[in-house]
Amino acid sequence: MREVYVIGVGHTAFGKFLERSVKSLTAEAVTAALKDVQIEKSQLQAAFFGNAMQGLVTRQEMVRGQVALRAMGIDRIPIVNCESACATGSMAFHLAWQYISGGHAEVALAVGAEKLYMADTKKMFENYDVGMDLEILEDLRKQWDEEAKKFGGQDSGENMPRSFAMDMYAAKCRIHMKAFGTTQRDLAVVASKNHNHSVYSPYAQFRKPMSVEEVLAGRPVVYPLTAPMCAPVGDGGTAAILCSGDYLKRLKSARPVKIRASVLGSGMDRPEGFGPDHITARLSKQAYEKAGVGPEDIDVTELHDATSMGELIQFEGLGFCPWGEGAAMAKSGATALGGKIPVNPSGGLVSKGHPLGATGIGQIAEIVMQLRGEAGKRQVEDARIGMTENGGGTVGVEEASMTIHILEKV
């Protein structure tokens, strides 16, 4: 396979934009990516468009990418529509990498855009249910809510408007707590770290620093999660332009980042718990082998913290520490800016936001900026190799799909 590089990234601010459309978010992100690399849209040879929920929000189905991209004058080329819940954008990026590495194009676009925020909050939250097995959803809802009520008389948050995905994450929290002694305060340490990082990100939906105590005092969602530990609903767009080594030679002022590994996989049926069969452990092993590196070589990572428990689980699954020791790493400061392995310098999903189709490419854009040395006050010093992990949906005990990318400074 051919070597593939990221040569341009674009990123809208994430937020709640009732007045905006998927077309406008797409156009802003793609235009910024083209400007970043200084090429024209006519030079794009293929496009991979990520969007998870537009069909539910606006009824636009089937040709989402063709509709959004033609509105800004991108047509005729192959346009592939991608959908994989929270991993939608990173799947689009993976397919663009695959298309170029296989010799089918010299330059391609990966773009993710999502318009999730709605005035009808009940419907907005119900839309998230489709990222799980709907045939068993009601049984799970009853089971997990009863379990939540058993924990120390804590409010289960059953009257708090939320997506059922938060109940799923809360159940994973309780399993991790039982297995390793993780506490609610440990989750608050992780959330506080990311909210403090977000102050330096112009793309973040929330940019307010928060102490551990403020996170713990936040509005309860479902035990043990408080609102500052959970990613907010929001809208946004992100884009990346990828190219082959031959195409890179034609560019005079590119700031390329090399893709060392791009891995896409699915979850499996297995007993609940944490170990080598966990999807993150399985796929990261593949990614490390493809890239020829190990977790000790990673300088910065963006990983999927739809809740702060997600960050702990993914951090451990990626092999940065043994299972159950992620909380101690976070408390030591190792995962903060200036620490041994900074995690989510962008602010993570809990403060940056989580517009599903845009999230995965947004993670990659952050790592590209870090490896170029263009991340401003959130810059990780001497970052040479970066990593992203982006999981999508839940079937059984783990994510339905996941992508992992390892990128290197050129």
Image: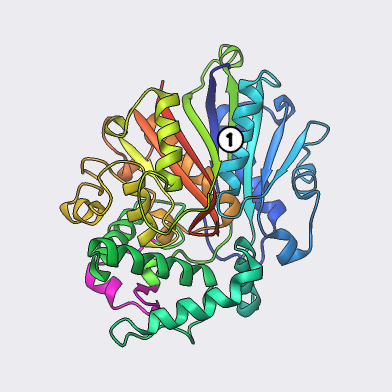
x and y, in percent, of residue 282 in the image: 43, 40
Does the stretch in magenta take in 166?
Answer: no
Helix, strand or loop at label 1? It is helix
Does the image show residue 311? yes
Relative to 252, residue 20 above or below? below
Total numbered badges shown on the rendered structure: 1
Residue drawn at the location 66% of the way across and 69% of the way down: 135
Residue drawn at the location 21% of the way across and 50% of the way down: 329
x and y, in percent, of residue 409 in the image: 39, 25
Residue 116 location, quadrant: bottom right
Nearer to the camera, 235 or 388: 388
- Which range is magenta? 207-226
x and y, in percent, of residue 130 in the image: 64, 64
Binning the other alpha carbons within 10 Å of mark 1 as few (below 14), some (14 to 19) or many (20 upward) gives many
Q: Which residue of the protein is positioned furthest toward the front in this rendering?
A: 271
Nearer to the camera, 115 or 156: 156
Residue 101 location, quadrant: top right
Does the stretch in magenta take in 213?
Answer: yes
Relative to 257, residue 134 above or below? below
Residue drawn at the location 33% of the way across and 38% of the way down: 300
**Is residue 304 toward the left or the right of residue 142 in the image?**
left
Residue drawn at the location 25% of the way across and 54% of the way down: 324
**Is residue 286 toward the left or the right of residue 55 in the image?**
left
Does the image show residue 187? no
Q: Amino acid at mark 1?
A: His
Residue beneath disc 1: 94
For the N terminus, the quadrant is top right
For the C terminus, the quadrant is top left
